[in-house]
Image (spheres, grey):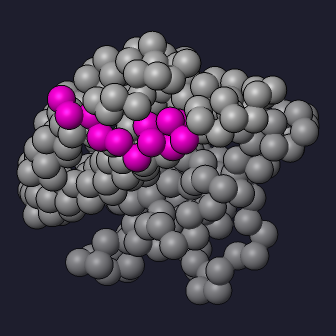
Amino acid sequence: RNRSKMSSTFVEKYSNLLPTLSTLKPILDSVDDEIIQLGRAINFDEITNISTSISRNVIEAQSIMDDYNNDMQVIKSTIATMDDTMMQDKEQGYYEEQERSTDSSTGRTMNPVSLSRIVSKLDTKYKRTLESTTNRALWKSNSRLTNSNLPSESKSPIFIPTSRDATLAKLIISDIHKSSTHASVDIVINEVKKRYWIPRFCSRRSTPSHITSDKATTFKMASTLWKMARILSLTENSATLKSHTGRIIERPLNLLIPLEIHSNESISDVPRAAVTIPLTPVSNIHPMVTRSRMAP
């Protein structure tokens, strides 16, 4: 320590700043070492543990620097308000000498601006390392996921749960509700339909099938999960069919599915009551009506 500082009015305050530097040094050294470890992390658990420790140390270092800057600013402000010009010039010289000096025990500069830059550079280095390491870990995880034997739905999930505990769905709806100036429910639902696939369960003949969406124009529609029925007889207005389960069904002709006529049998084999089946499709299509009756 220079002897000239001993004659300063603020010698005690300058001395009280030294423990601050002693506290700051191990924290900065620890952050520097942990950043190197973070760059070598290979999984998300390591990244999380190391980054948590670094964040805690960086916040503590920034807090110490805030106190250090405040103490130095108090001294500087007091010097600026001195009435004695000679004393003011003398103290200003001591202050500038203090800023240029280096603490012998820590090797750190006493300049608050330089110290703040050191902390800021470490913080920036940490954030860049964290981003790079996270991206690398994500790339490795995605590669393993892509090359795994999981089904495509598991590799690229598109389903958002909508149960009572579905936080993501609640956040999505809340965000749209706020961004639309608290619009009505219908407006919010319409906006949700524009942004996301709205799943619905397709059911044909009371048979559950795949999930599809009103908006999913490029998706495969629900697969036919039932077996075609066999035509037993034809009348003028309806056809009697037998399903693969043995159920006897009577269906209107205009709702008869052509594929239900087996390709391995001739239409002439089907018993009918002297009725000619129209070759052109019936344009008057109405909702399917089916009736079942007990087999004789």
Residue displayed at 31% across by 53% down: 125
Q: Closer to the camera, 25 or 203?
A: 25
Residue 98 in magenta? yes
Q: How many marks?
A: 0
Query: Residue 77: x percent and y percent?
Result: 70, 29
Left or right: 289 with respect to 239?
right
Residue displayed at 70% across by 76% down: 282
Q: Closer to the camera, 46 or 266?
A: 46
Residue 76 in magenta? no
Left or right: 200 with respect to 150?
right
User: 245 above or below 233?
Assistant: above
Q: Quadrant of residue 156?
A: bottom left
Query: Residue 243: x percent and y percent?
Result: 35, 49
The C terminus sits in image quarter: top left
Query: Residue 222: x percent and y percent?
Result: 45, 58
User: 13 above or below 37?
Assistant: above
Q: Quadrant of residue 181?
A: top right
User: 292 above or below 233?
Assistant: above
Query: Residue 242: x percent and y percent?
Result: 37, 50
The N terminus sits in image quarter: top left
Residue displayed at 22% across by 54% down: 133
The reply to whether residue 66 is in sight is: no
Q: Closer to the camera, 81 or 183?
A: 81
Left or right: 26 with respect to 217?
left
- The dominant secondary structure in magenta is helix
The reply to whether residue 98 is in sight is: yes
Q: Quadrant of residue 70?
A: top right
Q: Closer to the camera, 47 or 163?
A: 47
The range drawn in magenta is: 93-105
Residue displayed at 38% across by 78% down: 267
